[in-house]
Amino acid sequence: MEFQTKIIVLSIITSFVVSLLIIPILKRLKVGQMERTEGPQSHLKKQGTPTMGGIIMIITILLVGIFAFFTYYKSENQLEKQSAMSLIPLIASSLGFSIIGLIDDLKKLIGKNTEGLRPAYKMIGLLIISVGFILCITQFLQIGTDIYIPFLKTFITLPIWIYIPFAVFVMLATTNAVNLTDGIDGLATSVSTIIFTCLTVIGFISGIKEITIFGGILIGTCLGFLLFNLHPAKVMMGDTGSLLLGGAIVSMALYLKMPLLLPIIALIPVIETLSVMIQVKYFKKTGKRIFKMTPIHHHFELSGWNENKIVSIFSFVTLICCVIGLASI
């Protein structure tokens, strides 16, 4: 556990230093946030705030990840060598999703609009990364296709032809859910940090070193980034960051064989997604809206809640959900 603690501290410092270096560069390049005209009017003042801050996360994860990999790989202990090798697909999956987000952000900036990458192309990219990760953990790492059932505290084994499409669905749903959660300063980062902590604790309890190391990197990266992302944000993560966070969360959950835990510990992203789906379906049917605006954090924003209040309450709800999730195992 001492090494994992050092990894968290190293990741915080690295993320902080990289932020200090990258944010001025993004400003000079005029990589500014473009707010939707149909979004909350209060967000228009954020126009021009540096975006694509997910690049900070990419650099931090790569630097600390390489350090952690070689620290374990040079060990004479074969289990630690195996843990080092198992870090690769976890990091690669997260960065793969982030690259899709980076392309999306670049399309928005180059095209000077908020549309970005076509939804179909975006989903194809996410699908490729998802399938690649699932094949890697099932065929090469041989972690199996069994899934833990929360509260029942038992595993069920799925046939591979059922497990793969199920796991792909979970990966696509989770990355898009976290992407929708990224709408106000510090929200996605705060919620994700708590979820990462929960999954890391599960990894520690289960004795899965690669999860505790990877989780430590993510926790530290988010905490360092959060210093610049809380309201009023000095940098936005963009899809580069939100897809990375979603990809990292679901990669950890699948590696732990606990995708069914996500509806509990990631309840906020689930609610954010459901609010959009309900709003769209109800509007198409009646021409009226249930919420003032979706995702639901905008509904609370338009109801008079300030951004810090929303982040605090949503984070507290996530913390409670993670405690329930830990109790379910």
Image (spheres, grey):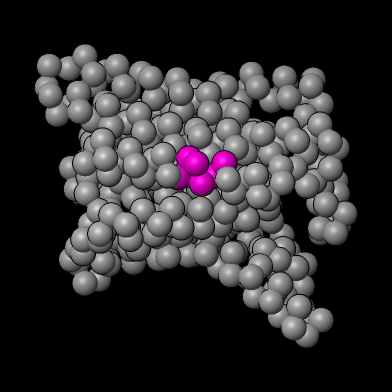
Q: Residue at x 60, y 28 (%)?
A: 55
The dominant secondary structure in magenta is helix
Which residue is most to the front?
161
Residue 52, relative to residue 289: is it above or below?
A: above
Q: Which residues are magenta?
A: 125-130
Does 112 sit left or right of 309 as displayed?
right
Residue 157, relative to residue 133: is it above or below?
A: below
Q: Residue at x 27, y 44 (%)?
A: 138
Which residue is most to the bottom?
286
> Residue 94 appears at what percent x and percent y?
47, 37
Which residue is most to the left?
77
Q: Between residues 132 and 239, which one lies in front from this camera angle?
A: 132
Residue 310 falls inside the magenta stretch: no
> Residue 129 appears at what percent x and percent y?
48, 40
Q: Residue at x 28, y 49 (%)?
A: 256
Does 180 sit left or right of 25 as displayed?
left
Instruction: Answer yes or no: is residue 176 visible.
Output: yes
